Image: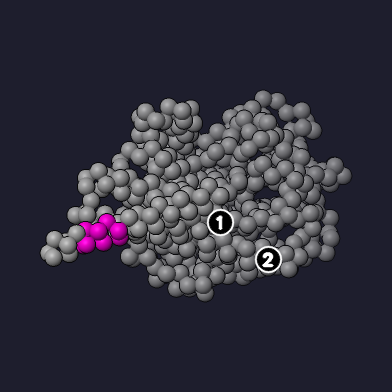
Amino acid sequence: MVEATKMMEEETKLHIGISEEESMQQLRSKATELLLREEWKDSIEAYSNFITLCKKQIFHTHLHSDNQLQKLRKSLCLAFSNRAEARSRLREFQSALEDCDSALEIDGTHLKTLICKGKILLNLNVYSMALDCFRLALLDPQANGNSENLNGYVEKCKKLDFLSRTGALDLSDWVSNGFRGKCPELAEFVGSCVQIKRSEISGRGLFATKNIDAGTLVLVTKAIAMERSILGGKDLSEEAQLVMWKNFIDKVSDFIRKCHRTGNLISKLSSGEDEEMLEVPDIALFKPETGENKNKKSSDSENEKVDMGKLLSILDVNSLTEDAVSANVLGNKSNDFYGVGLWLLPSFINHSCCPNSRRLHVGDYLILHASKDIKAGEEITFAYFDPLSPLHKRKEMSMTWGIQCRCKRCKFESEMLSKQEMKEIEIGIERGMDVGGAVYKLEEEMKRWKVRGKEKGYVRASFWAAYSEVYRSDRCMKRWGRRIPAMEAVVYSIIEVMGGDERLLKIVMEEMKKNGGGLVEMEKALKLARDVYGKVVKKQAMRALLELCVATND
Ligand SMILES: [Zn+2]
């Protein structure tokens, strides 16, 4: 009797064992099939069910022989690995990484997982850790058939890791080839020359920790999300703008949903309220190597939720358009795109009418460089709106940006332009008075009021439209040329206060072409081009950029 019960129990156990094994088999083949069919969502679900079952089986270890246990663990490892693959295809990188780590906990050298993890880390710009994964994968004897591919990844990681440590970008080939072919691979980089601090301009700002030479790259960073629209030669209609904005918001929300760390970082951005109360985050949080994966569990628990209302305010305050006066877009030949994006660290940069940095957009990357020499301790700024415009225009623009510019230049000009004589010149220009005469009067007034040094640059920048019209007109120059300062003197006095600007470079180049400038002039123009575009290309390619600058319309 006892024996019989025991036998029956054994049989039941065996029976359950078999049926569970069968259903596991079925689940597994279903999941694999879905994976092969690239039905990522369903395959993730199937693997999840399989993983639950498999874990349950392993938990009842007393039911299995060592051999069976080994088999189960192997299946579990593969299931984690495959689920990671499916999740990474959906760009759910954070959960995919967790799956990779679960698989590697079971088998630390699991080839497929190592490759999958390496690719995910590359996507997350964590280059040196990605490199570790591919190197380890290469050691696997099974990697032989795949070694060429793996070596390619190893080389790519090395290159990007170097870039992210040095910021030593070189876009020369791509530029020289007229931007044909794919745009070069860039790596995120945050120079050791910057930190985030409380700013006197507003809230928090980015500051130089050491002297930065003009042209030096300060940071290279990839957009959290970007949305582009084709202009087709026209301005975007209101409807098209709304659609674009909605798509952009969707993309950012999607990113936050998939990556808690990014959500956390976005929540640290200003929503335009209580600027002075905001904490000053450590810049290390924004560096590429402070990985997604490190401390992921702790960051999960402290994850700050960004509600939709707050997110909309944050995007409203911090989104940048590629097509801005302080930016250049490389590789978009037609100039027929209008792109909006969110970049984390650049969101901390405040506006100044005497900016010292500019942006370059390459694909989804934003490259920030010093557009003039910056001293240690100085705040890094770029212009949110055109600094080559008069004070009243800048005040209008400030309003639409919801800021109040209190820069030295605005302060000085508020005083200077309140003088009756200056007002008369401004009104005169608006009413179409001879620009040569206006510029002559301006210079005379500046002499009379003993405007010196930088202050001259402030006034000239504000009246740049009049100055450039005079210098471009032979008729004007014939009449006024001898009585007003030379174009170069004016241009460089403006550059001294507001750094390189494409329009200033353009007029210098035009003059050079007209006069058949020599080596000295060319060197000067190249130096100016570095202020405008940053040190991203070698000399020869910089000449190509100069040609491009001359060819663009104002
Ligand atoms: Zn200002």
Which span is picked out in magenta?
8-16
Question: Residue 363: x and y, percent?
Answer: 60, 46
On residue 243, the disc is 2
Side of 36 where 395 appears, left or right: right
- Pointers 2 and 1 in contact (CB under 8 A)? no
User: SS at mark 2?
Assistant: helix
- The residue under label 1 is which amino acid type? Ala
Q: Looking at the rendering, which quadrant does residue 14 occupy?
A: bottom left
Q: Position of residue 274 (x, y in %)?
A: 45, 73
- The residue lying at 72 percent from left, 38 percent from top is 548
| Drawn side of residue 460 relative to residue 1, left or right | right
What secondary structure prevails in the magenta region? Answer: helix
At a point 72% along the width and 64% down the height, the residue shown is: 240
Q: Secondary structure at mark 1?
A: strand
Above or below 443: residue 130: above
Q: Nearer the viewer, residue 432 or 232?
A: 232
Residue topped by disc 1? 225
